[in-house]
Image (cartoon, rainbow, N blue to C red):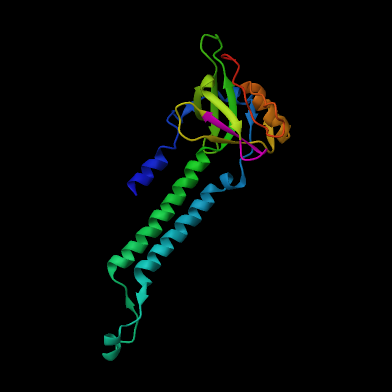
Amino acid sequence: MQSALLRLRSLVPKFRSQDVLPANELKKAFFEATPGWWARFTWGFIAADLLVTSSMTEVTWSKWTRPPSDDEKARGETAAVLRPAWQRAGLAGVHLVFGVGLAAALLIGRSRVVRRLHVHRVPSGAAPAQLFIQGVHNRDAHGTLVPFKHTHISPGRDDSEVILRVDGVRGHWWVALSRARVNGVKVGKLQAREALMSRWGVRKGPSLESGAWVGGPVVKNI
């Protein structure tokens, strides 16, 4: 149980998750995504998961019985008998581990769904550009600020998503391309992907059928 929780915790970004940018700057965000339905309703799924988990645990502990044995029947005891405590506790523990693990996985998965990307530049130009990543779990002007040169994008599972990775951080972020906005303008999946590829200096490989990405980022401090 502890090793599983530590493994899940390692997927959480190691950067500070409470970086803040001025609200007026975020109004000019480079990329805004519409998260998938599961990310928008994560808390509902977690509530249902915890409700089912608690119910199953209670039923297992208080209602899991066995038929009476032959000796018990011979003594006239025909009612079902609660199973030994170690059996009920073991199965109840399985329910709890599975339920809590599922809730944790949903929360971690939700934290890796991108809602907004913004390239932040220091006005003086003395420092390299940074990428502000705002997930579904971030509110207002809170998010994660990382050096842009340490970020990379790659193709997702299909043409509706792009994968964002950051050097030194385990795991990745999902960037949905459907119903996205680039510089405040609603665009299609193809235009959204091309805008991201252009920003990161990525180009497709020589084979258009494979769709492989072979270059980038080629920008320096943008």
Can you give x and y, in whole percent of width and height, for residue 212 in the image?
A: 65, 31
Q: Quadrant of the C terminus?
A: top right
Quarter holding residue 35: top right
Residue lying farthest to the front in this orientation? 207
Q: Residue at x 43, y 59 (%)?
A: 53
Position of 207 relative to 6 (above/below): above
Residue 206 visible in the displayed image: yes
Residue 76 visible in the displayed image: no
> How many discs mark residues in the rendered view?
0
What range of the chain is rendered magenta? Answer: 156-165
Position of 123 relative to 46 (above/below): above
Q: Residue at x 62, y 25 (%)?
A: 214
Nearer to the camera, 73 or 124: 73
Can you give x and y, in whole percent of width and height, for residue 184 in the image?
A: 69, 28
Magenta residue check for 92: no
**With 135 as the anchor, is 64 left or right in this view?**
left
**With 116 as the anchor, is 14 left or right in this view?**
left
Q: Residue at x 39, y 41 (%)?
A: 7
Q: Residue at x 51, y 48 (%)?
A: 43
Quarter holding residue 93: bottom left
Nearer to the camera, 119 or 212: 212
**With 214 as the anchor, is 79 left or right in this view?**
left
Can you give x and y, in whole percent of width and height, for residue 151 in the image?
A: 53, 25
Nearer to the camera, 79 or 19: 79
